[in-house]
Amino acid sequence: MFDTVVIAPDEKQRLLAQNEGHFLDFKDRRIAPGKIARAVSAFCNADGGDLYVGVSESPQGGMFTWDGFSDPEDANQLVQVLEEVSPFGTDIDGEFLSVEGEVGFVLHVNARKSRVIRKTTEGKIYKRLGAQNSPVVKEEQILALRRQKGIESFEAETLPIGLDVVTNSEAIIEYLLTAIPVAEPETYLYKQHLITEGKPIVAASLLFADEPQACLPKRCGIKIYRYSSEEQSRDRLVEDPVTIEGPLYKQIYGAVDRTIEIVASAAFLDEDGLRSVRYPQETLHEIITNAVLHRDYSITDDVHVRIFENRVEIQSPGRLPGHITVNNILDERLSRNPNLVRHLNRFPNPPNKDVGEGLNTAFESMKKLNLKSPEISETDNAVLVVVRHESLASPAQQVVDYLKSNDSIRNEQARKMTGIDSESKMKKIFESLIKAGEIEHKPKTAGRGYAYQIRRK
């Protein structure tokens, strides 16, 4: 059923030298099938990982040895159990590893983050936490996992507020006059299932309450910070953080406009005077929109936009939903909050014009300005997108391009331009350019004023 991959002895040693953790698990080939099911369930319900069956741990712990199956057929029972947890090719793939000149086959299972909850053959649920496969038993744990998978969304929960909050607001009246001009507010919201059991759901409040922050305190605003350096600290704040509130449509445009305004006015002073940075408006718009649309509203936190000298950071509460990872986020689609996505797209000049293409647009806009692509990462309970003001060109090319239109350049100037944080690293780049005959030391410059110029022909 699986291919057999032959690896070199040194590759085997590198594998065995790794430590078990959140993404890696070693299992003895004599392990009970139920424990294998538990391990794969845990990986699929978390962030995915690699499982190796046929690796033994010494009794003292910490030392792993290659102790594979004498024949791949000996693993058939384990393979059948894994197929019951998740059909091969869906969330998991497998292969056998053998070592040149050695006996034994190790079963390698690559488990991916699943869009559904994967259970063991006994119907139990596990989730990988660090190096442990932890049971998910309590109702609130299962609900949290369902939300993480995008199976359920907090946006669909009802709120203990009056109907008039969403049926008699400026936001709903303005929306219906421009988007759905024939509907009465209450009738429309019922038909769209934004009111259930006589109560507005979370999505209705976010979209159509004039002050959704009163309905969902401390979990649906946007805070914008400007720092006077490249570091995040309270004493580096230029001014008090700006808080953007209101229904999501106005909130998104308000946050984007304020961020662009702050970035445009954020000239930073150094030895060469005031300098400013420029980011594509489309990039900031799409990333902020994405953060608002796809955040986890069950988490008591706001979206945070932090503006530094050399970058902008947008932090959105909640991890990536379902099977979405930082590696496939530009190719895969899964909406945590489908009601928000659908209804915001019905507004005039919707912030999410090309549904599902927002981040792709953000990346393309950076390339057009010859800037590096945004960096996407996950923390324990949030998604962080970093937009750096850093050129796609190599540092050496940036130096040469700069000197084509400028008389000279110093180490400090070059570091600010290229994003290199080390004076010695920048000096090595200068030395390589001198050796290549591209630049030379500018005469009569020394000490802090030591500079380079294009080599005179």
Image (tube, helix red, strand yellow):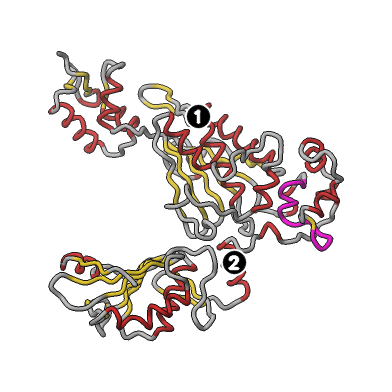
**What residue is shown at x 61% (from left), y 63% (from top)?**
151
Q: Residue furthest top?
A: 457
Q: Position of residue 16 (x, y in %)?
A: 24, 71
Dot 1 corresponds to which residue? 266
How many C-alpha atoms fall within 10 Å of the one at disc 2: few (<14), some, or many (≥20)? some
353 lies above or below 441? below
Question: Of the residues shown, which amino acid type is indicated by label 1?
Answer: Ala
Cα separation between marks 1 and 2: 42 Å
Disc on the earlier residue, 1 or 2: 2
How many C-alpha atoms fall within 10 Å of the one at disc 1: few (<14), some, or many (≥20)? many
Q: Position of residue 158 (x, y in %)?
A: 75, 61
Comparing 289 with 100, the one in front is 100
Disc 1 versus disc 2: nearer the observer: 2
**What residue is shown at x 51% (from left), y 36% (from top)?**
283
Dot 2 corresponds to which residue? 146
**What residue is shown at x 63% (from left), y 75% (from top)?**
139
- Classify mark 1: helix, strand or loop: loop
Answer with left or right where residue 453 lies relative to residue 257: left
